[in-house]
């Protein structure tokens, strides 16, 4: 089958390479010409284990090629960004633009799958937009069998873990939500070709809701852990030890606190649920506030320690939003470092093995630079752990015995 994947980022590129590995003829499309050039040169434009090998095989066998405009295919997967607008509503402009670019290419029987995370009802609205622009095409109807030759339109949310994407793309269960049952069936048939996990058919609205519920669940539970860490700090209790003990209860599983919540998903998607019914979502909105407030709390702790030194040297370990990736989107670590540097009066050494240069947001700040781990450690008065990268967790805790330590990521607790 010819499959077109629109948006070749963290989700689209591994999916495109995986589909190519399963024998499909895959056309990747991305509006960013640098991404297109990198894909055609078989070079991943972000770090993800084993993606380089899969991409190399897909491109050299001619099964995957990329361009800045979409091409005709039998299945079209949309994996473009759905960020938060300043008013905390979903910014669907990328998705709408992707659908517009697809309109002239659609033909009877094509499958259109929205993989991007979206507010409930979005897939139906996009289907209506397609129907308005292409009255010549039959559309699926909610709850009814589709007319002959109708388009198949579905939402199949992605739930991969960056850092383990290829494994999870194949092994995770997938939710496949069709506008109608035959849409879910058509989408399920495509995913069954590369997913060994279960494929759960439902309607598009339920699929959209389930994906948002997953991320709101994570956010609320992380907020609980973060709230515990703030209370423990006041109470003079080691939160990590206390949580480890509480988790010995057979029905308790408290998550790990951290410097906040980042990334493109958990910090964003709960708002898509809350926007639909703000009055009904106090818990989800409070969790967002707790997690968004955490970087300021961590920075305040670091600055309180800094007051003990004339010109403190502060080593900040990690900038990415989660361990073992180079992704800085919505990273709370970035916010902590920025707050500490902006306070001034300190030398800030950033240790981030996944970066060769500081991001623009930090590069312009005085008194802050990227440093090797050993250099930063030797120079530091204060050590701040912000990301539990595996290489940090391997460092013996004894190396930091003489330092003032703020371990916001639980690096030294194992
Ligand atoms: N990253 C994750 O771990 C993850 C996990 C689950 C779900 N998601 C969801 O998947 C979607 C995509 O996320 P991502 O992390 O892959 O984003 P990304 O920013 O890494 O990649 C998106 C790509 O789409 C391209 N693009 C934007 N508009 C386009 C258009 N009109 N036509 C073609 N290409 C276009 C961009 O240039 C970019 O390369 C989002 O809705 C996100 O919430 C992401």
Image (cartoon, rainbow, N blue to C red):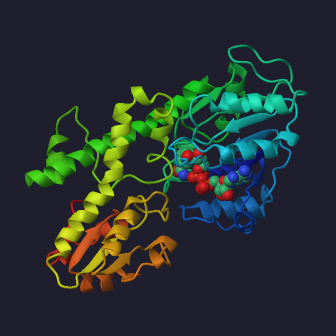
For the point 53% across and 61% down, the residue is: 49
Residue at the front extreme? 87
**Residue 376, image x and y in percent?**
31, 82
Foreground pick, 15 / 231: 231
Residue at the left extreme? 236
**Residue 319, image x and y in percent?**
41, 67
Q: Is residue 213 above or below residue 292?
A: above
Say left or right for 239 vs 103.
Answer: left
**Residue 267, image x and y in percent?**
44, 48
Q: In which quarter of the image is residue 377?
A: bottom left
| Res. 371 in view | no
Foreground pick, 386 / 342: 342
For the point 67% across and 48% down, the residue is: 94
Residue at the right extreme? 136
| Res. 227 in view | yes
Say left or right for 98 vs 349.
Answer: right
């Amino acid at each position: 089958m010819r499959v077109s994947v629109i948006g070749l980022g963290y989700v689209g590129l591994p999916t495109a390479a995986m589909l190519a590995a399963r024998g499909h003829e895959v056309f990747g499309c991305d509006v960013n010409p640098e991404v297109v050039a990198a894909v055609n040169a078989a070079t991943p434009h972000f770090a993800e284990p084993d993606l380089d090998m899969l991409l190399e095989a897909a491109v050299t066998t001619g099964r995957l090629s990329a361009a800045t405009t979409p091409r005709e295919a039998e299945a079209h997967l949309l994996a473009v960004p759905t960020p938060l607008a300043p008013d905390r509503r979903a910014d669907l402009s990328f998705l709408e633009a992707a659908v517009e670019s697809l309109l002239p290419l659609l033909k009877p029987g094509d499958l259109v799958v929205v993989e991007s995370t979206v507010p409930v009802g979005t897939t139906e609205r996009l289907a209506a937009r397609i129907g308005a622009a292409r009255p010549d095409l039959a559309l699926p109807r909610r709850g009814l069998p589709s007319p002959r030759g109708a388009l198949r339109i579905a939402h199949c949310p992605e739930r991969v873990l960056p850092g383990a994407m290829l494994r999870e793309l194949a092994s995770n269960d997938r939710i496949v939500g069709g506008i109608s049952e035959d849409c879910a069936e058509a989408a399920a048939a495509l995913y069954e070709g590369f997913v060994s996990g279960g494929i759960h058919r439902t309607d598009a609205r339920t699929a959209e809701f389930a994906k948002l519920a997953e991320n709101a669940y994570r956010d609320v539970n992380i907020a609980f852990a973060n709230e515990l860490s703030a209370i423990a700090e006041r109470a003079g209790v080691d939160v990590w030890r206390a949580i480890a003990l509480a988790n010995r209860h057979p029905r308790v599983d408290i998550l790990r606190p951290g410097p906040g919540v980042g990334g493109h998903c958990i910090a964003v998607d709960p708002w898509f649920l809350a926007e639909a019914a703000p009055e009904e979502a106090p818990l989800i909105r409070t969790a967002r506030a707790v997690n968004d407030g955490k970087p300021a709390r961590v920075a305040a702790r670091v600055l309180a320690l800094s007051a003990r030194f004339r010109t403190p040297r502060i080593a900040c370990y990690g900038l990415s939003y989660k361990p073992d990736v180079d992704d800085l989107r919505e990273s709370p670590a970035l916010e902590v470092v920025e707050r500490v540097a902006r306070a001034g009066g300190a030398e800030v050494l950033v240790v981030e093995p996944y970066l060769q240069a500081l991001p623009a947001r930090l590069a312009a700040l005085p008194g802050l630079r990227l440093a090797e781990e050993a250099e930063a450690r030797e120079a530091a008065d204060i050590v701040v752990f912000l990301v539990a990268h595996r290489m940090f967790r391997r460092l013996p805790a004894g190396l930091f015995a003489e330092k003032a330590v703020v371990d916001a990521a639980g690096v030294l607790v194992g």
